[in-house]
Image: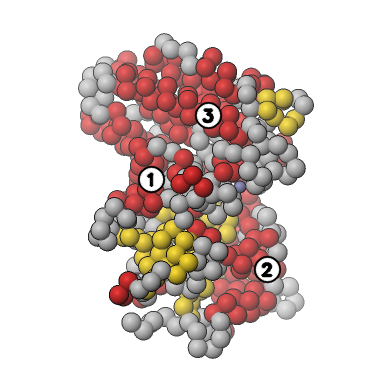
Amino acid sequence: MPSVLRRAVCIHGHFYQPPRESPWTGRIERQESAGDYHDWNERIAAECYAPNTEARIMGPNGQVLKRINNYGLISFNFGPTLMMWLEKENPAAYAKIIAADRESSRRLKGHGNAIAQAFVHLILPLADPRDQRTVLYWGILDFKRRFGRDPEALWLPETACDDQVLSLLIDFKMKYVILSPSQAERVRPLKNQGPWWNVSDGSIDPKKPYRWFDPRSLRKRFIDIFFYDGPISAAISFEKLMSDSKVCADRIVQAFGGEESDGLVSMATDGELYGHHHKFAEMGLAYLLSEEFPRRKIEVVNYGYFLSKNPPLWEVQIKSGPQGLGTSWSCSHGVGRWFLDCGCGSEGKSQRWRTPLRQALNTLKARLDEATLEKGEGLFQDVWAARNDYGEVISGGVSQLPDSFIQRHLLKKSSLDIKRALHLMEMQKFALYMFTSCGWFFSDIAGLEAVQNLKYARRAIELAQEISGQNLEPEFLEIIAQAPGNDPKFPDGLAVYQDLARK
Ligand SMILES: [Zn+2]
């Protein structure tokens, strides 16, 4: 089948911040490290999220020629909890992001630029299947509410996946997913199912989509995969390639490989790069997309649109990763970064705290689930179905259980029952939030992000005590005390929990 799109380009931005609100007040406390701003959300919104809605194209004399809404020209996903914050704190930028998706959908025949994200940014292969299902369900529900349409794809936190996670995306009717080229194992032509070709060294051709079949389904169930261009994405992220749009465009043209070659060159990076990590990169991005590519007759598209014109001709299998735990885009040890002292993100410090932190939270989660089952039985028709629907309450920023939820899920409807049901749902919410991947990503357990996870744990423990009368804290403290820290002021996880992870 000939490609309808000869040369196309797509840049994906993953826009995300971990939730920073206090689980007690729902407000973000002042974060000193954010400098002149109240907190990091505010700072990054001012440097990146908002400027990308009106990136300037400058004339030769420094005059502003026009302003480009970059979200209309890139593929993007926003963390749902970040969207909740933007909706409240920067409604103007928020509205322009939603509008950009509508506009792109008109331009690209029903394929909008936005894709969904798992509601909680946790490492999916390390979560149990019920929790995987819930955070995907919540993410899709949140997306529909905001963008007013079904998502075609979902961004996997840290692109972390294994066969089980991809299979779940198929359950949720996702058409495609974006992965790192390092996650591909082998490929073969779809037609005739010829011999496999090993691409485990990262040598997969990223210019075309691939079809992945669920190994448990006899080729009946599938999802398509785009692997972004690794070297160019890395150059944009770490070598400031976006400083010069012309140089960037030339580099991308080279990636097509010769005059006769065609396909899609796609890049994926953190969205915060454009303006926050890399100052003024939002202007470079705007110029690249609105001037350099059109001049070179390269079409600016998104993945969904490209896929509609160019269905896969190749099949792929993905790596199972060390111990079969899956792989990701920011750890060369599979998903080790989120539970092991693997060396990624160490900044010369020890990360021996990562395993005990994971163990402490896993043990706590098992206890919280036991309490949920035990106490949920008398309150809910089906406590796990209720948890799924609770996503709507969270996404809507509502602090009470709505009538529709009460009618649908509660067995008894006294005000005490309703209050207990709400507390149980909140406990489950924090039990998922406490696995936010950023808690393990950086170098020390006393960092903001790990502390935030521990605050969620503390709040979940409090709610469990209220609901079941059980004190889960001593067991938790015993394990977290085994997490050695790097800061002499906070020598272990216990000190971090006691001194930093409080109201
Ligand atoms: Zn690693």
On screen, residue 382 above or below 258: above
**Identity of the residue drawn at 57% across and 18% down:** 478
Q: Mark 1 points at which residue?
A: 136
The percent coordinates of residue 342 (x first, y second) are 63, 43
On screen, residue 31 above or below 229: above
The percent coordinates of residue 273 (x first, y second) are 63, 57
> Which comes before the other along the chain, label 3 or label 2?
2
At mark 3, the secondary structure is helix
Residues at marks 1 and 3, CA–CA distance in whole angstroms: 23 Å
Q: Mark 2 points at which residue?
A: 241
> Which comes before the other along the chain, label 2 or label 1?
1
Decide if residue 342 is on the left or right side of residue 415. right
Farthest residue to the right: give it: 488
**Identity of the residue drawn at 30% across and 75% down:** 192
Name the mark nearer the viewer: 1 or 3: 3
Q: Mark 3 points at which residue?
A: 359
Decide if residue 41 is on the left or right side of residue 380. right
Kind of residue at badge 3? Gln
**Identity of the residue drawn at 37% across and 67% down:** 315
The percent coordinates of residue 327 (x first, y second) are 50, 51
Residues at marks 2 and 1, CA–CA distance in whole angstroms: 33 Å
Decide if residue 244 is on the left or right side of residue 123. right
Kind of residue at badge 1? Leu
Farthest residue to the front: give it: 195
**Identity of the residue drawn at 58% across and 56% down:** 270
> Which comes before the other along the chain, label 1 or label 3?
1
